[in-house]
Structures are given as structure tokens and as C-alpha cells.
Amino acid sequence: MKKITEACSTMWIWIVVGLLLLLFTAAWWLGNQLVNFALVMQGETTGRTKRFGTSAAGREKTPHQETVRRRRAEERQRTETWLQQIKAEQVALVGEDGCPLAGMLYFCNTPGKRWVILAHGYSGNGEEMLDFARHYMQQGYHVLTPDLRGQGKSGGKLIGMGWPDRLDLLQWIHYLIERFGSEIQIVLHGHSMGAATVMMAAGERLPEQVKAAVEDCGYTSVWGIFADQLQKLFHLKPFPVLYLAAWALRLRGGYDMRKASALEQIKKCEIPMLFIHGAEDEFVPVRMVYPLYEAANCSKKLLIVSEAEHADSKETDPQLYYDTVFSFLKYYI
């Protein structure tokens, strides 16, 4: 009887161990699935959101969306013509963690010391910022368009969502200063994930050459935007899926998404910041911009563009957009 009892106890121990291993494996698989879905590039991109966000495929476009599409096409045509007339140079450097980073320099025909670093959005690359670049160069700025890690020609297995990218942005800032001299003046301008990158970088100790920043439709935190998209796409609460994804990301990406917060970083910002958001943005909800703006302890301005959806404020009202940007910057550059 004693031997039977011991055998039963041993069997139950192994059953419990097996169940725990099965639970661990399932948790690891589920967490990795979300990381792969959201942060691993899948084929070529056009600079628009591929996996997160509401797809317009198969839906009738609204008059506003048709206007944005037309204006975007017209802008791109002007930009293609402009690209034939300027000097451009491909550049590269290595991030603090050894990640290879790629970017492009565009040189204004008018000599000057003003530079802007343009940070692109989720699943995009530096090329999507060329319309912005043309407008900046018309104002006498030279331009750097980096490919954020995991996208474009930069290395990295995962999209950084702005957190590791904030340190890469610092690397690019130092690159410009070392190459073009300590007298240069630098503006940071990003949209969507690039805007979050700019806000996260603004919470670090920046060189005095960085004079101002523009964030266009950035999110409060990586955790916040993931939680919002989980609800919209899959009707899921953060627990347990997002916690499992955070665990997988920490092991694979080397950072905790719960600490990847533009909201916390912006509290330490010391440079002037212009906040822009579309009133009808559903991907990065417009409600996110208000706590960001309130938390910023710096000279600041807020622009809410009526009718604008995600990342299309500049096409919704181009004159208002660029007049506001350059009117804001002229006080600091």
C-alpha cells in the first residue's frame, strides 16, 4: 500500500510539472505570436500601417479620404520632381547596442546651419517623410531621414515602437554635430511612431544644438497603443495577452514595454514642443494628445486639425499645418 501511495504521489507530481510546462509553452507561444504580429516586418511596405489600425480595404472611401488621397498623390508628384534637383547622400552608423542604422541626407541648395531630423511612422521608412522634407528645405533646412530599426534599410529584428529608437535618434543627432559642426541647429519632427520616438528622445539629455521638436499624432506609450489596438482588433483586454507579449518582448527585444512611455519622457522635456493631432484619429486616438500636452514641462503649442484622421493632418489642411509648424519654429531657430 505504501508503494502504491508513493507511486501515486510521484505520478501527480509529474502531472503537475507537465501541466506547468504546457502552460508555460502556451504562454510563450501566445506572447510571441503578438510580438511577431505587431513588431516583425512582413514583406515590403509603403509607409502605411499594415497590421495595426483600421484597414480601408473593401470599404467605400469618404469624401475626406478621397481628398487626402488626391492631395497626397499631388504632393508625391511634386516631391518626385524636387528630388531630381537636390543633392542626396546615403549614410549609416551603428547604434549603442550594435544595431546597424541607415538614413539619407538631403542638402538644401541654400547654405545654412539648420537641420531637421524626420522620424517616420510604424512599418514605414525614411522615404515616407520626403513630402515633409521638401517643405522644410523650402524654408532653408537640410534634412536627415533615418530608417528606424527593424524597418527600411536599418537592422534590427523587431520594430522598436520608439523606445530603443530614442537612443538611435541621439546617435543621429551626435552624427550631425560631429560632421557638420557645433554651430548647427536641429529640429526633431516625427509622425505616429516617429512622433512617439521624438517625445521619448526629448526626455533624454539632448545636446544644446537641438532647439525644438514637432510631434504629429504620437501615442502616450507602447503599452497604451497596444492595449487600444487589442481592444479594437480582437476585442481583448490587456490581461493576459498583453502581459505575455510584454514578457516575450523583454526577452527578445531587451526592453519592458510598460516602461516605454512617451508620457513619462515628455515630463522631462526641456525643448519647445509642438503637438499636432487629427480630430478624427481613430488609430492613435485624439484623447492621447491631451495628457501628453499637459505633462510637457516646456514651451509648447497644441494644434488639433478638424476632420483629420491618422497621420493625414498635413493633407487635410496643408496651409494650416505648415504655417503652424514654421511659425512655431521661427521663435527658436
Image (cartoon, grey):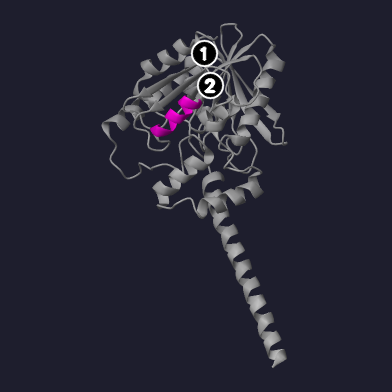
Residue 117 visible in the shown view? yes
Q: Quadrant of the N terminus?
A: bottom right
Q: Nearer the viewer, residue 299 or 232?
A: 299
Q: Earlier in the sequence, mark 1 or mark 2?
A: 1
Secondary structure of the residue carrying numbered label 2: loop
Instruction: Answer with the quarter of the image where residue 100 lies.
Output: top right
Name the residue located 68 percent from the left edge and 16 percent from the top edge.
177
Residue for point 47% across, 45% down: 227
Which region of the structure is painted magenta?
286-295
Q: CA distance from mark 1 to mark 2?
A: 30 Å
Residue located at (72% from left, 90% from top)? 3
Amino acid on which the number 1 mark rests in the picture: Met
Question: In the displayed image of the protein, which residue is found farthest to the front?
Answer: 2
> In the image, is residue 90 above or below residue 33?
above
Q: Is residue 14 left or right of residue 140?
A: right
Q: Label 2 crowding class (10 Å Cα cut-off): few <14, some 14-19, many 20+?
A: some
Res 137 label: 1
Q: Position of residue 268 (x, y in %)?
A: 59, 25
The circle drawn on residue 297 is: 2
**Residue at horizontal 37%, vertical 33%?**
281
